[in-house]
Every structure is written in C-alpha cells, then in structure tokens.
Amino acid sequence: MTTRPTLLGYVRADALSCAEELAAATNSLAVFASAEGFTLGTVYTERDAAESAAFHALLDEVKRSDVRAVVVPTLQHLGANGAPVGMQRDLESHQAHVWAVDAR
C-alpha cells in the first residue's frame, strides 16, 4: 500500500465571520487533500494575524519536515489586506508548494 504525502493546512480565523465558517473552511481543506491524493496533516489556525504565530509554526514544520505542500481556503488567508505574496514566497522558499482550495 502506498502512503499518501502529507499536506499541511493554514486558515486565518479573522478572514471568516463565525465558527461555522471556520469549520467549513477546515473541512474544505480535508476534502481537497483527499481529492488531490494527500493526507491532511496539521491545520494551523491563525487567531491573531498581527502576531502570525500559527504561520510561523507552519513555516517551522515545513523547514524541519519533508512536507512540501500547504493548502489554504483562498490565497487571502496568507495575508491581511489581500497581500499574500510575502507569506507564499516564504513557504515556497522552503520548497513548499501552496495550493488554494478556491483555485481548483
């Protein structure tokens, strides 16, 4: 039996309006992972975008593991005010491909 590669998730809670949307966004990451042949690993949920603690924990896991894929509900989850380029670049500089569920 072949082991599926791991895909990490990242969601910004402040980009969503309620707990139900957060649950739906997290579920969409699991559905995406399964459909694309991955196993969903840790989903990092950012509670305070100003501190970016969850993003830094995600980046640390990418640096220290062999995980090379990250999924977000939309690219806007990678940056406040619609500027995801820097965070995406940080992940890609460590050979992590970034997927967005809404881009399929």
Image (spheres, grey):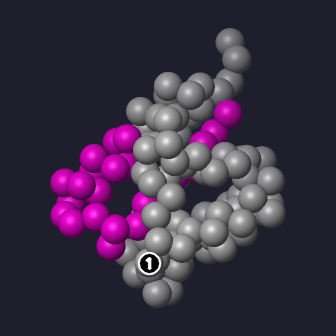
Question: What is the x, y in percent for residue 29?
Answer: 44, 43
Image quarter of residue 19: bottom left
User: What range of the chain is rendered magenta?
Assistant: 5-28
Question: What is the x, y in percent for residue 88?
Answer: 65, 63
Question: Is 8 covered by the magenta stretch?
Answer: yes
Q: Relative to 84, is 68 above or below?
A: above
Q: Relative to 53, is 95 above or below?
A: above
Asked if one can make out residue 88 in the rendered structure from this viewpoint, the answer is: yes
Hey, which residue is sitting farthest top in the picture? 1
Bin the neighbour count of mark 1 within 10 Å (Cα to Cα): few under 14, some 14-19, many 20 and up: few
Instruction: Identify which amino acid the numbered label 1 is placed on.
Output: Asn
Position of 46 compared to 86: left or right? left
The residue wearing badge 1 is 81
Question: What is the x, y in percent for residue 42?
Answer: 52, 52
Q: Residue at x 75, y 59 (%)?
A: 92
Q: How many marks?
A: 1
Q: Residue at x 80, y 60 (%)?
A: 94
Position of 89 compared to 71: left or right? right
Q: Relative to 57, is 52 above or below?
A: below
Image quarter of residue 48: bottom left
